[in-house]
Amino acid sequence: MPQLPRDTRPDATLSLLADPYRFISKQCRAYGSDLFETRLMLQKATCMTGPEAARLFYDQSRFMRHGAMIGRIQKTLLGKHGVQGLDDEAHRLRKQMFMSLMTPERIEVLMAITAEEWQARARLWALRNEIVLYDELHELLTRAACAWAGVPLPESQVRQRTHEITALFDAAGSVGPAHWRARWARKRADRWIENIVGRIRSGQIRPPEGSAASIIAEHRGSNGELLSPHVAAVELLNVIRPIVAVGVYITFVAHALHQFPECRRKLEAGDDTSFTEMFVQEVRRFYPFFPAVAALVRRDFEWGGYRFPRGRRVILDLYGTNRDARTWDEPEAFQPERFRKWDGNPFNFIPQGGGDHDLDHRCPGEWITIGLMSQATKVLSRHIEYDVPEQDLRIDYSRLPALPRSRFIICRVKENA
Ligand code: HEM
């Protein structure tokens, strides 16, 4: 049996951390292979890229998620015992709970809430010299996410909660003090939402029917029991946190509108609604967000002539798969029109994971993400006007999530009539 190409470094953790978005695809290109073996945190790991590897990765008879997540990500970004680490029936049941929140009607409600928040913020921005868009989006989206999810957010707590939720995704990938800030934020946020869940269950708070808070607080597992307050809190934060994290993509929407003026002109004209959708898809394909996902091999198997031993950690490259030249012509170019011809394959365009939304671990928040990005595209191209002053717009690929170094500054904001 052929040997997998093997990284020659004794351990590749530092190389991965130095360039988390491009490490896997670069190595794969160097080895002329879709997969290679390396060591991450001293343990053997198999890294894979491309649509065929993605199809394999989402085969649940071969891979499982329990125990796959790296501890420091669980202690910050995701929290413990949430849907991400479940398998089989337990996963399907929990996933249904998330999918039931994603009806078109519920998504419309979120869009109406965020539309009001955009208006309120734009009015404040018009009174200021300049604003840092990425920073401003945190509060806008925290207010909207909590209102939509049915989580009460008193005005006196807005700043603190915004800060905590943001730290969960903005500092999770860091090392040193920022990582500890994220751990502290996770503890505070878990405790806050556990308390809310307790008050919903005791009838002190009545969230709207169909809201995330109501559905998650009442959800029963396969044993017929309510989720523990801690797990319910982790899952409710699994709704609120990523809505706030869409601010990363909205910052890239603003970046793309600025860097690709011919797209902005088409969007300003507003006569081709399908172009907005293609533009948003291209932002999700082109810009970095989640670099990769991890699973463990369930039992020994062979694929493509290579052996996958039980227990091996396998990492699928999301960013590189979205830029794979076998799927995308000129993958390094920003071309929304390419989505006119995209075949809809669930394994070749995977910014939020691949496979099936109901059955696999694919992100249940894709429709919300696309909705919020489309709305932001309209606001930034048509509802408000602004200037983009001189600033460092280069994307820092070494941080997680990657961001423009300046966080996108805008000035002289005006609302259009
Ligand atoms: C899972 C990305 C927005 C809720 C995931 C996964 C990725 C991802 C890469 C893992 C897929 C896998 O393991 O195979 C993103 C990005 C977003 C986003 C880049 C943009 C901000 C959202 C939103 C929500 C959400 C808006 C909910 C409102 C979840 C949940 C899971 C998940 C609950 C776990 C699903 C499971 O394990 O079955 N997301 N997501 N995400 N996402 Fe998102």
Image (cartoon, helix red, strand yellow):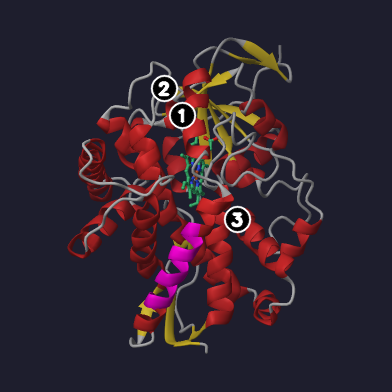
Q: Which residue is mark 3?
A: 284
Task: Say what amino acid the circle numbered 3 marks.
Answer: Arg
Q: Which residues are magenta?
A: 109-121
Q: Earlier in the sequence, mark 2 or mark 1?
A: 2
Task: Characterize the local packing of mark 2: few (<14), some (14-19) or many (20 or more) Cα atoms within 10 angstroms.
Answer: some
The image position of residue 405, as x and y in percent, is 43, 67
**Would you place residue 89 above or below residue 386 in this image?**
above
Q: Earlier in the sequence, mark 1 or mark 3?
A: 1
The image position of residue 166, as x and y in percent, is 33, 55
Task: Characterize the local packing of mark 3: few (<14), some (14-19) or many (20 or more) Cα atoms within 10 angstroms.
Answer: many
Q: Is residue 79 visible?
A: no
Which residue is at the front of the view, 374 or 39? Answer: 374
Whole-Å distance between the Cαs marked 2 and 1? 17 Å
Quadrant of the image occupied by residue 67: top left
Which residue is at the front of the view, 322 or 91? Answer: 91
Q: Which residue is mark 2?
A: 67
**Would you place residue 14 above or below residue 409 in this image?**
above
Task: Say what amino acid the circle numbered 2 marks.
Answer: Gly
Task: Say what amino acid the circle numbered 1 marks.
Answer: Arg
Which residue is at the front of the view, 62 or 361? Answer: 361
Q: Which residue is mark 1?
A: 94
The image position of residue 383, as x and y in percent, is 54, 81
Residue at horizontal 33%, vertical 36%? 217
Classify mark 1 as within 8 Å of ligand 1 or not, answering yes or no: yes
Direction from residue 186 to residue 408 in the image, left or right:
right
Q: Nearer the viewer, mark 1 or mark 3?
A: 1
Direction from residue 181 to residue 265 in the image, left or right:
right
**Would you place residue 231 above or below residue 308 in this image?**
below
Q: Earlier in the sequence, mark 3 or mark 2?
A: 2
